[in-house]
Each structure stands twice: as C-alpha cells, then as structure tokens.
Amino acid sequence: MNKNIYAALTVGLIGCFGYGITELFVRGRTHITMGLLGAVAMIAIHLLSENITDIRSLLCAMLISAFFITCCEFAAGEYLNIMRKMHIWDYSSLPFNIDGQVCPRYSLAWSFLSLAGFRLDKAVRARAFSANKNGAAPLSEAPLS
C-alpha cells in the first residue's frame, strides 16, 4: 500500500476514534457520523501539517483547519440535522449561530483542537512513518507476519 494512503488511513482512524471519545467525555454522547467527521478533519490536519515550519505557519494552519472543520460541520449539519431531521446537535441557542449548525464558539474550539491534532500528527509521523535511531524500518514498512 502506498505510504501516503497508509498515513492518511492511520491518522483518519485516530481522528475517528479520538473525536468520538472526546465527544463522549464532553457531551456524554456521540453519533457515528461524528467519527467520520473526525476522520476527515484529522486527514486535513495531516495534510496541513506538512507545511508547518514556524509559529506563524502553525497559526495559519490552525485557522485553515478550523475553517475547514466548520464548513464540514455545517454541511453535515444541514444534511443530517435539517434535511434528515436526525437532531444530532443544535447550536440555535448559541449567539451568532448559522442555522443552528455552526457558531463562533465551536469554530474557535476547532482551532485549539486542531493544535492538538497537529501535535498528534507529528507524533504519529515520528513513530509510525520514520526510521528510528538504530535504523529500523518504520511501522508502515514493517512486515505483516
């Protein structure tokens, strides 16, 4: 399997389960579609993290990530909550919300969660996709048997 695809799948799975678990702790519940959004968000973070070289590029990546995640949340909310009437979340009581699906409070939260995602991505890249100090192959190139 192509190393880039393996990396995207790995961080996607981490985002899927990581976001689902985070939601369980914060809200006390989650929905399977939130795992899918977590995976998409983490893959975007993974792609953005390739260009982070200093604090300025990190801040820019955090803003881009928050905007991307907010757009994904809005699209998912319009489809799942409005069109399909699944009522997974509702921000209509929060100030400056858009159709009850997104609001500035959570957009800001996504930027800080993105920072955690960038750090996690860096750790995954170092552990799973780079040769270690004694020259052993990374986990992504380890034999399956």
Image: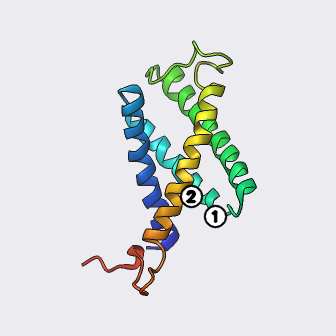
Assess whether mark 1 and mark 2 are in contact (beta carbons under 8 angstroms): yes
Tell me which residue sits at (48%, 62%) in the image: 123
For badge 2, the amino acid type reads: His
Return the x and y of residue 38 as percentages of the image width and height: 48, 44
State the CA–CA distance, disc 2 to disc 1. 7 Å
Quadrant assignment, res 54: bottom right
The residue lying furthest to the top in this view is 93
93 relative position to 60: left or right: left
Local packing at callout 2 (Cα closer than 10 Å; few below 14, some 14-19, many 20+) is many
The residue lying furthest to the bottom in this view is 135
Question: Which element carries disc 2, helix, strand or loop?
Answer: helix
Tell me which residue sits at (57%, 34%) in the image: 73
Quadrant assignment, res 26: top left
Quadrant assignment, res 87: top left
The residue identified by callout 1 is: 50
Return the x and y of residue 111 as percentages of the image width and height: 62, 41
Q: Is residue 37 above or below residue 136?
A: above
145 relative position to 81: left or right: left
Return the x and y of residue 100 as percentages of the image width and height: 59, 19
Tell me which residue sits at (52%, 19%) in the image: 90
Residue 63 marker: none
The residue identified by callout 2 is: 46
The residue lying furthest to the left in this view is 145
Local packing at callout 1 (Cα closer than 10 Å; few below 14, some 14-19, many 20+) is few
* Quarter in which the C terminus is drawn: bottom left
* Quarter in which the N terminus is drawn: bottom left
Tell me which residue sits at (50%, 23%) in the image: 81
Circle count: 2
Viewer-closest of 46 and 73: 46
For badge 1, the amino acid type reads: Glu
34 relative position to 69: left or right: left
Question: Which element carries disc 1, helix, strand or loop?
Answer: loop
